[in-house]
Image (cartoon, rainbow, N blue to C red):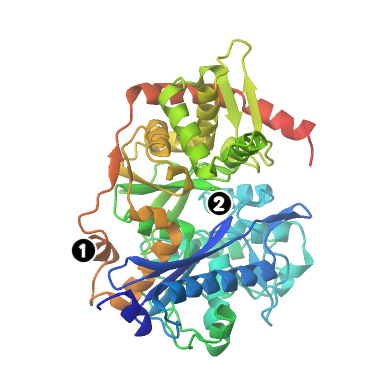
């Protein structure tokens, strides 16, 4: 293909769309997997009746606006109206609970991954299955609804994730990429499907047996990267592109979760590779050489988009509290008439913290917990800042304490993975908003993990670009071409990214900080009790 305009006009561009926590983004790529247009739509979850949710209207308004912004970008750059695409892929935040009746009607409002309301179910299922079931997993939400005797459960005929729901509405297919499926219910990496023994154990539970469905009947079908997952229907085309320009019949890739697209965007799907996605939430994923020796509540076992086992540490909170502090500094600068961009404020404060802050933050301590954090055993979050009377209260120490806080719970979980389980990782690839300020988030993560951290130029496109790559793989792979080979030979040729080694002094400083952080967890719990919502 000669250029982007020709690629788009001939219908050979590939589209990836990802629903993140605060942003829905579309990335259009060419035949060399390079982004050629994009669009986005901001949104925020809402706390309604004690449940974090997004409404159906927010989902579809967001998708349509995001697509329209991408189409507008194409029109302005290339003077082309999109009518055809070679492939489309939909990805979204993993986990959560979207349950439907036999007519396809949503039974209860979407319960997102962010909720920490399934503690009893998660604990019981972990014990029954001998497999860690975190609170945010879809099966934990379903079982908690059963334990709560919620009347809607008897009517459930299908439940899925956000990506699975959108894909279903666009194609009519009740399917899910295996990586996203692994956050609904445990996967057997040998069969590359749901664990049948565990399905039988779930169905045999006394409280489950009274319902008129079997678990296997209401789960979406799990598909591997590269599998055909249906085509855009006439109704789906109208749902995606309200202008009516987009034609039906476009093939869609298996819908994936943000973990799978993060692995794809950082080329970390092979054994002994790993990645850290740091945005509203933060999670680390390492592809395992062998099974873990024990069940750890802090560690999830999910899969790559082709079904290989991955150890995952997921934390609900990362940059939201940091962003709030930056917003306050922006407000302060505006009050004095200073025309300082938000990006410059981020850059100056982050670099000052990294270059001039004390390695252990000088006695300052922060909790960034807007919501509960299962890794540290909290069901509710209360952002909190504390310092010792003799602490060195400098701006650099203050911001460094908040940067550390953004990765503190991740470090607690990963210390189990690396120090107790002795899991080996050659390089961790970082992506997400925390890494936008060059060298800072990367250096802090290297200190937290005591491992080399790489950031690729392309990782800035993140999940939607990763989803576009997955869709490209489906339609462009050679016969028998493995996904890892496709990434190495056709997407990331010669790209290693910038690598930062852990600084021993930073590692020691973060270790000291984390000991004080763990000691202060009871105070975090007490604040949640003292300041009820």
In the drawing, does residue 147 fall left or right of residue 284? right
Name the residue nearer the viewer: 93 or 11.
Answer: 11
**Which quadrant of the figure has residue 104?**
bottom right
Q: How many marks?
A: 2
Give x and y (percent) for residue 343: 50, 43
Is 228 located above or below residue 29 in the figure? below
Say which residue label 2 marks.
133
- Sort mark 2 into few (<14), some (14-19) or many (20+) by Cα contacts within 10 Å: many
Q: Secondary structure at mark 2?
A: loop
Q: Residue at x 39, y 25 (%)?
A: 506
500 to 255, vertically: above or below: above
Q: Residue furthest top?
A: 390
- Depicted 71 relative to depicted 22: above or below: below
**Horizontal placement of 495 versus 117: left or right?**
left
Residue 381 % position (x, y): 67, 39
Q: Quadrant of the C terminus?
A: top right
Rendering coords of residue 185 (x, y %):
53, 61
Mark 1: secondary structure: helix
User: What residue is disc 1 on?
Assistant: 489
Instruction: Looking at the picture, tell me which residue is in the foreground, 36 or 216.
Output: 36
Which residue lies at the image location 68% right of the left edge and 26% below the top edge?
523
- Tell me the quarter of the image containing the N terminus: bottom left
Q: Is residue 496 visible?
A: yes
Camera-side mark, 2 or 1: 1
Quarter where residue 441 is shown: top left
Q: Residue at point 42% right, 85% down?
A: 84
Residue 18 seen: no
Alpha carbon separation for disc pair 2 and 1:
36 Å
Graded by Cα atoms within 10 Å as few (under 14), some (14 to 19) or many (20 or more), the crowding at tag 1 reads few
Q: Position of residue 47 (x, y in %)?
A: 73, 53
């Amino acid at each position: 293909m000669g250029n982007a305009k020709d690629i788009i006009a001939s219908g050979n561009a590939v589209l990836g769309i990802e629903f993140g926590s605060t942003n829905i983004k579309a990335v259009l790529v060419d035949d060399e997997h390079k982004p050629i247009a994009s669009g986005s739509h901001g949104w925020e979850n809402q706390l309604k009746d004690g449940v974090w949710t997004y409404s159906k209207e927010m989902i579809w308004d967001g998708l349509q606006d995001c697509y329209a912004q991408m189409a507008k970008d194409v029109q302005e750059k290339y003077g082309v109206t999109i009518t055809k695409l070679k492939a489309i892929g939909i990805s979204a935040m993993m986990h959560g609970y979207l349950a439907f009746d036999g007519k396809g009607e949503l039974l209860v409002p979407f319960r997102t991954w962010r909720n920490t309301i399934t503690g009893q179910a998660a604990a019981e299922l972990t014990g029954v299955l001998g497999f860690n079931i975190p609170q945010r997993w879809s099966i934990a939400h379903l079982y908690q609804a059963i334990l709560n005797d919620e009347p809607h459960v008897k009517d459930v005929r299908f439940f899925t994730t956000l990506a699975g729901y959108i894909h279903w509405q666009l194609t009519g297919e009740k399917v899910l990429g295996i990586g996203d499926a692994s956050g609904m219910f445990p996967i057997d990496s040998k069969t590359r499907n749901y664990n049948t023994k565990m399905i039988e154990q779930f169905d045999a539970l006394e409280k489950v047996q009274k319902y008129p469905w079997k678990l296997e009947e209401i789960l979406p079908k799990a598909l591997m990267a590269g599998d055909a997952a249906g085509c855009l229907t006439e109704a789906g085309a109208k749902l995606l592109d309200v202008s009516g320009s987009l034609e039906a019949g476009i093939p869609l890739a298996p819908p994936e979760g943000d973990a799978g697209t993060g692995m794809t965007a950082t080329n970390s799907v092979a054994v002994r590779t790993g990645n850290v996605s740091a945005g509203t939430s933060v999670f680390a994923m390492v592809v395992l050489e062998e099974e873990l020796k024990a069940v750890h509540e802090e560690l999830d076992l999910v899969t790559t988009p082709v079904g290989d086992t991955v150890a995952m540490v997921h934390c609900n909170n990362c940059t939201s509290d940091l962003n709030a502090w930056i917003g306050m500094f922006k407000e302060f600068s505006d009050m004095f008439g200073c025309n300082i961009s938000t990006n410059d404020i981020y850059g100056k404060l982050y670099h000052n913290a990294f270059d001039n802050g004390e390695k252990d933050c000088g006695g300052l301590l922060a909790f960034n917990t807007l919501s509960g954090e299962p890794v540290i055993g909290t069901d509710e979050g209360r952002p909190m800042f504390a310092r010792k009377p003799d602490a060195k209260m400098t701006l650099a120490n203050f911001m460094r304490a908040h940067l550390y806080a953004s990765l503190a719970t991740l470090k607690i979980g990963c210390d189990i993975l690396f120090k107790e389980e002795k899991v080996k990782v050659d390089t961790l690839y970082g992506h997400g908003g925390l890494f936008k300020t060059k060298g800072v988030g990367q250096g802090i993560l290297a200190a937290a993990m005591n491992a080399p951290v790489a950031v690729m130029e392309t990782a800035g496109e993140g999940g939607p670009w990763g989803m576009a790559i997955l869709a490209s793989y489906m339609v462009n792979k050679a016969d028998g071409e493995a996904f890892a080979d496709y990434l190495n030979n056709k997407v990331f040729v010669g790209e290693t990214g910038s690598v930062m080694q852990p600084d021993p002094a930073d590692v020691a400083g973060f270790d000291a900080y984390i000991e004080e952080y763990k000691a202060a967890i009871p105070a975090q719990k007490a604040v949640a009790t003292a300041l009820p919502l």
